[in-house]
Structures are given as structure tokens and as C-alpha cells.
Image (cartoon, coloured by chain):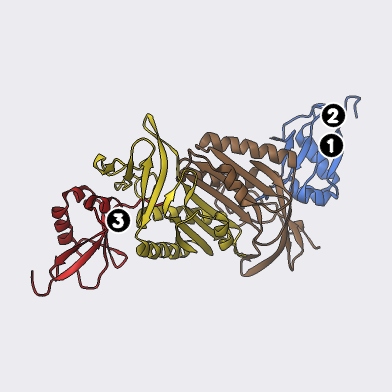
Chain colours: A brown, B yellow, C red, D blue
Amino acid sequence: MIELIEGPIETGRLLAAISDSRCGAQVMFVGSTRQWTAKGEKVLETERLEYESYREMALKQLQALADKACERWPVKKYAIVHRLGKVMPEEASVAVAVSTPHRSEAFEAAKWLIDTIKHDVPIWKQEHYVQNGAEWIHPSSGNCSCDHKKPVDGEVEVSGSERTQL
Amino acid sequence: MIELIEGPIETGRLLAAISDSRCGAQVMFVGSTRQWTAKGEKVLETERLEYESYREMALKQLQALADKACERWPVKKYAIVHRLGKVMPEEASVAVAVSTPHRSEAFEAAKWLIDTIKHDVPIWKQEHYVQNGAEWIHPSSGNCSCDHKKPVDGEVEVSGSERTQL
Amino acid sequence: MSANSVLVEVLLFAGAAEKVGKRSTSFQLEPGDTIENLQRVLGQQYPDLEPLLGISRWAVNSEFVDSSYSFRSDMQIALIPPVSGG
Amino acid sequence: MSANSVLVEVLLFAGAAEKVGKRSTSFQLEPGDTIENLQRVLGQQYPDLEPLLGISRWAVNSEFVDSSYSFRSDMQIALIPPVSGG
């Protein structure tokens, strides 16, 4: 199951889709809109996120990543759903679920998928702050909270000039 | 949320329980009954699992592990549910879910929790094979598929003498 | 058996309960007796339990203890064979 | 502009679409022109886009390509600023 959808993500659908009699382990990652984000001394409040994609390429890339995960790990079934449009605090923007015979490979495959999705799939978020307007998030290379490329903590926007006031 | 229950695990309840406005990441592990298990050249078919626990101690240990996870990682909310009694193929026997601000720590905390639960919480499974009777599973130390102690693949029962025919 | 001896009940689970044929068993222990003593007595009484005893842990009042632990009264003692939850 | 020049449409997304003020833009390119040429022309026409251009990738027909890629006709070209899904 690979989907880009406009409405809420129903995680139960993903888990049902990956159920498999050869598998004893399912791992699901759910990414959701964080309302409160610590940034240095300050805490920023997010009103909502808005996602857009290059749909055709995003679907193609997601399929390629899922295929690669099935090659690298004994993933028997997978489900990847990304929501587009407005996503409010605590709502899910993405869910990635895999089933494998044993658990360590499920954790590895799910983590690799979400890390790689965040680097290689053409989907973008626009963060709408309660007090600071909106900005498209374009993480500069090397400034990513995952260990996919460099283990530096925190996403950083490209530059101050990327910020636009609403 | 920490529960030992007799009926089906509703994973939606766990995800609802860990929703948190400070968190952008949720990871849930679901362990389910594997119907088909490769063992050397053979494939064994499981008819069902039956779980029993030392309930009082299991609840105390689960709470202690959850507390430790919250100390080691910025886990804001957690949910751990283990099912007891009969669990049929593809049904969930255990679900562990955590929410954290960022994703790498959610993967680490969820993996540590399920690995540690499988080593230190007094719950046991009796595997009922379609063709080979039933046996209580008591993994000898060092024979575990996780990397908690030694990274040796496959759980092994104590000895042939532990097997009883139904 | 001294006048001070205590009756200790040991909870049994899973394969251990199966080998012994019941879910708990009682022993008369002397003050100062340890888990090690209890384990020896249990193994003598139930030889089938020996292989499992060798790889099991013990718990007192829902906490793991080591084999040098010595008994007092009012304790819930449990033999914890290798666990397999999850 | 030669007789063989091709009209190339470039898809723009997110911050790049915001800077340019539209979701696609067209350029007349010569046969043999590469992504590198296109990127230079785009930067000259939209100076605000420069910082983002420097850290963006390019895709042709839904696959990432490098800057030496040279154009043919019938291609869907997209500027892919650093992604932030998830």
C-alpha cells in the first residue's frame, strides 16, 4: 500500500494491510504535527503544517524505496501513506508500517524507510507558526535530525530570507 | 498505559493514548503469532500460542521498564499492552508504543522496551504446533534473536525434554 | 527442623509448573536459608525440574534476587524460568 | 536561438514556487544544453531563487539527474528544493 491522501490517515488500515502469517513483527512509525518545538531558549508554537508534493515523482520514489527495503530486509508487506494539505497539531502526516518474520529487521526497515523518505521523496512542508508567519521548510544538507547523512540535531531552514510573513 | 489483557489488542487505543502535542514521532511495535516458522530445512506450522504471566510481578516490571525508558529517552507518553491466554496466527500478542519529540529516539525507546520486555518480564508462551504437540518456550541464555545480550539468531527451547505431546 | 523454621510457598510457572505438576509448592526452611538452599531442595524433590532450574531466576516479592538471598517470613517467592513474552 | 531549440517547461514546488511566484516556468534551450545551463538561466531571471537553487536537486521524468544531464524533447523537468516530508 502506497498512498498520498488529502484526508486523515487511518493507521488501522495500514496495520490490516501488513498482516502476514509468516511475520511475527510489525513496526509502524507515525509522524505527526508537533505543536510545541524547542528552539534554543524559545518554544515555538505551530498552528498547522501544509504539505505539497510532486505527486507523480513522489509515488514513483516511494515505490522504489519500498522495493529496496524488501531487498535489504525480509519485509513481507509494507504500507506507506503520506497526507497532503493541512495537518493540524497531533494529527498524523505520515505513517510507515512493515511486517517481517522477526522484530529487529522490522525496526531497521521502518527506520530506514522514514529516514530515506525524508531525504529523497519530493514532499514539502510549510510550517505555519502562531506568531511568526509561515515558512517552507528546506533543510540544508547536513542539518537533519536523523543519522541518514550527518548526525547533526535539528532541522534548520535555508536562510532567514526564506521566511515570509502571512 | 500498561495492561495485561485476555482479549484482542486494539492498537488504535494505544496510539490514542500516546498522542502528545510536544511529540512529532510515534513508534509502535506489534508482535503477533507467526503461523509459519522456518527452522533449518523445515517449516513448522503454529496452531496457536498460549501466554501466561506472573501478573503481579509482570505489571511491576513493565512499570519499572517504562520508567527507565522515560529516563533514558525523551519519551512523553507510552503504552504497553500484552495479551494473555490463546493468541491465534496473525493476532497481536503484544503492542508497545511511545511518543517522542523526534523520530530516532522513538525507534530506540520502542526497540529497547520490547527487547527488555522479552528478557525481564515474567510472561511465557506455550507454542502449540499443528503437528508437533505443545511446548513451553524457555530461551536458554544467549539464544535470542535480539541483540539485547548476544546477537545469536533464533530462539531455542531449553532441551528436547521440555517438549510434551498434547 | 528448628522451632524457628518457616513454611515457604514457591510459585511455579510455565514449564516449571508443568514439570512439577502444580502451580505452587511448599517447603519448611530454617532461618538463614538462602535461595541456593531452596533450589537444591527443589531439584532433589523434582529431578525433572533440574535442567530448567539451572537456567531460571528467582523473585522475592516481585523483584529478581540472586541466589545468596536469605529468607525472612512473609515473602512471596517465585521461580522464574526464562521468559518468552512478546 | 537556433531552429532546433526546444521549449522546456520547468515545474516548481514549495519555496521555489513561492520565490518565482508561479508553479512552472518555460525556457527556450538549445540541443546539448544541460541542467547546469538551465540552472544559470533560472538564477539570472529570478535572483531571489539563487540561495535555494544552490541546494536544490533536479529531476527529469520523475528521476533525479545530475547537473551534466543534457536535454532532449518530451521531458518533464522539475526543480526539487530540499524535501521536508514526513
Is C65 placed above or below A5 here? below
Q: Residue at x 47, y 64 (%)?
A: B70
In what element is the residue under mark 3?
A: loop
Using the rendered image, report if marks 3 and 2 lie on a common chain. no
Callout 3: chain: C
| Residue to which mark 2 is pinned | D30
Circle 2 chain = D
Give the secondary structure at mark 1. Answer: strand
Q: Is residue C70 visible?
A: no
The percent coordinates of residue D3 (x first, y second) are 91, 25
Nearer the observer: mark 3 or 2; the answer is: 3
Q: Is residue A116 left or right of residue B34?
A: right
Residue B107 appears anywhere in the view: yes
Which residue is labeled 1 in the image? Answer: D9
Pointer 3 residue: C13
Q: Is residue A17 left or right of residue D28?
A: left
| Distance from Cα at disc 1 to Cα at disc 2 | 14 Å
Residue at image point 72% right, 47% down: A5
Q: Are marks 1 and 2 on the same chain?
A: yes
Q: Residue drawn at (51%, 54%), measured in percent from left and top? A: B9
Neighbor class of circle 2 (other Cα within 10 Å; few <14, some 14-19, many 20+) is some
Q: Are dots 3 and 1 in contact, CB under 8 Å?
A: no
Q: Calculate the distance from the C-alpha at mark 3 to the C-alpha at mark 2.
A: 80 Å
